[in-house]
Amino acid sequence: MKTFALLFLAAFLLVTCWPLALFAQLLLPLLWLVTLPFQLAAIVVGAVFAFIKALLFLPARLLGQR
């Protein structure tokens, strides 16, 4: 449903203001490339926190408490 909404908005923008729609089509991949390092950093930070959580809860899991 989200994809349909985005497609509908892009088509509506193309009909109403085509220069802005073309600019958005060109700008979106560049914006994605700029934000890619931040997305990777967020994944790494989440993985580190999950690892620390697993280490902290390891004794309780070994003793059988859940």
Image (cartoon, helix red, strand yellow):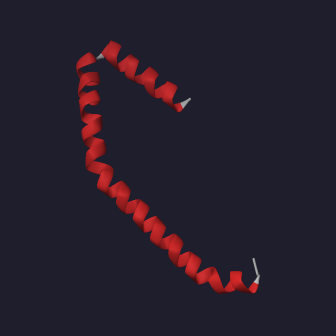
Expressed as whole percent of the image width and height from the top left, the position of residue 45 reads: 42, 67
Picture residue at 45% right of the left edge, 21% below the top: 8
Farthest top residue? 15
Q: Quadrant of the C terminus?
A: bottom right
- Please state which of residues 57 and 19 is positioned toward the viewer in this rendering: 57
Expressed as whole percent of the image width and height from the top left, the position of residue 51 reads: 51, 74
Picture residue at 41% right of the left edge, 65% below the top: 44
Q: How many marks?
A: 0
Q: Quadrant of the N terminus?
A: top right
Picture residue at 47% right of the left edge, 65% below the top: 46
Q: Is residue 64 left or right of 21 when viewed as pictured?
A: right
- Please state which of residues 61 and 45 is positioned toward the viewer in this rendering: 61
Q: Is residue 20 above or below residue 36?
A: above
Picture residue at 66% right of the left edge, 87% below the top: 59
- The quarter of the picture where residue 43 lies is bottom left
Q: Is residue 39 above or below residue 24?
A: below
Q: Is residue 20 above or below residue 45?
A: above
Expressed as whole percent of the image width and height from the top left, the position of residue 48 reads: 46, 72
Q: Is residue 20 left or right of 2 when viewed as pictured?
A: left
